Image (cartoon, rainbow, N blue to C red):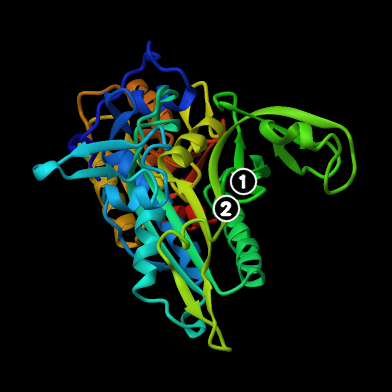
Amino acid sequence: MLQSKLFYKTNKNKSANADSVSHDLLTRAGYIDQLMAGVYSFLPLGFRVLKNIENIIRKNMEDIDGQELLLPALHPKENWMKTGRWDTVDVLFKLKGAGDKEYALGSTHEEVVAPLAKKVVFSYRDLPLYVFQIQNKFRDELRAKSGILRTREFLMKDLYSFHANQEGLDKYYEIAAKAYEKIFKETGIGKITYRTLASGGTFSKYSDEFQAITDAGEDLIYICTKCSLAVNKEIKAETPSCAKCGNGNFEEKKAVEVGNIFKLGTKFSTPFDLKFTDRDGHDKPVLMGCYGIGLGRLLGAIVEVAHDDKGIIWPKSVAPFLVHIIGVENNPKIKKVAQKLYADLQKQNIEVLYDDRENKTAGEKFGESDLLGIPYRVVISERTLKENSVELKERASEKAKLVKLKDLRKAIKE
């Protein structure tokens, strides 16, 4: 991508209305734009990061046999009445349509996926079944805050599992939990993300949240100082000592929830009469599990963890580009080498942003490069060309090194 053509705008000054690091940096670097409270546009840079996160999640869901589908965002009132949630979910957006019809904007999709499964599941031979979607959700949050960490419209991955018995649900629940741990590791926040015991609410006694440690987090979690088991604030009173190792000492941390998993049981299968016939010819209710990850919130959490006082430091797995090429003097020779390098790296399937702008100083280009947070910066100047080299610097490192042009791809790959 040529930077002169990129649809974005940066701001070197801290945002006055930003209440989190990620909100400030993502806005200033031109990754997102706020339309109104709790609603954001993802500009091309932000959309590229979002798609990279989406692809990591999708692969891991497919690896545990999830089949992708796409469910409607507009739901009939009748389905929510059947589950009793039309009047109990306080964040539900409700709409009136033609002919006095009423609808909900999907804040979650149990009311859609359960009746859908009823059209497919009849026998024990049809189970287990695992389906997932990546879809926009809508929640009328009373206090949308911290940028994309808490919004009213957001992109979310939902996986739903359907089982014939508790043993099957319990087994798959742990498989999904491991997949979540892998997702957070691959997106760069694995070391500070804890599987956290939480109340199951109306679904079950317990559920699991995945909480990423950050000062911008709204949640408090308590981490066992011996084995690192975490519990959230709402159930801390029930666990004065660690349920895993018996230790009584916990460390309190602020965190943001980046994922959660629930054993739904028959909570949503019963209202829709979702049953199957077992091997003995008896009808039984299908057991369900649900597993969610908010993509925008995960993106924000990554920035909360991966930044310095100059800007974002993207993990390579989710960065909008891997390499940022900068020519520091406006002369034909430097421009020619930069253009050739840009073309060569693209041919090698390396994502490249080339700063081809001629109206910016070297200092302005370097400052913006740090703000954008692309993993590798490649600088071409008269000094480097004298040695047939470029200056290669990792965003996370203070030091740069000279690398021969012919060895650049190898240096990046290593």
> Where residue 320 sits in the image (x, y, percent)?
37, 44
Residue under the point 71% across and 36% down:
235
Residue 298 point in image, percent of width and height? 48, 41
Q: Residue at x 62, y 57 (%)?
A: 177
> Which image quadrant: the N terminus?
top left
Where residue 219 appears, as percent x and y from the top left, is 60, 29
Q: Residues within 10 Å of mark 2 (few under 14, many from 20)?
A: many
Mark 2 highlights which residue?
A: 262
Q: Position of residue 329 (x, y in %)?
A: 28, 29
Q: Is residue 399 left or right of residue 195?
A: left
Kind of residue sitting beneath label 1: Gly
Are dots 1 and 2 in contact, CB under 8 Å? yes
Could you classify mark 1 by the number of other residues whose Cα lies within 10 Å: few (under 14), some (14-19), or many (20 or more)? some
The one nearer the camera, 258 or 292, is 292
Per the rendering, the mark at residue 119 is none
Asked if residue 5 lies left or right of residue 285, the reply is left
Q: Is residue 29 left or right of residue 146?
A: left
- Count all numbered tags in the image, as a single digit: 2
Q: Amino acid at mark 2?
A: Phe
Which sits in the foreground, 307 or 107? 107
The residue lying toward the viewer, choosing from 92 and 26, is: 92
Q: Nearer the viewer, residue 259 or 326?
A: 259
Is residue 11 placed above or below 407 in the rendered structure?
above
Residue 103 sits in quarter: top left
Q: Is residue 51 visible to the viewer in this orientation of the structure?
A: no
**Mark 1, secondary structure of its residue:** loop
Which residue is identified by label 1? Answer: 200
Instruction: Establish if 380 lies above or below 276.
Output: above
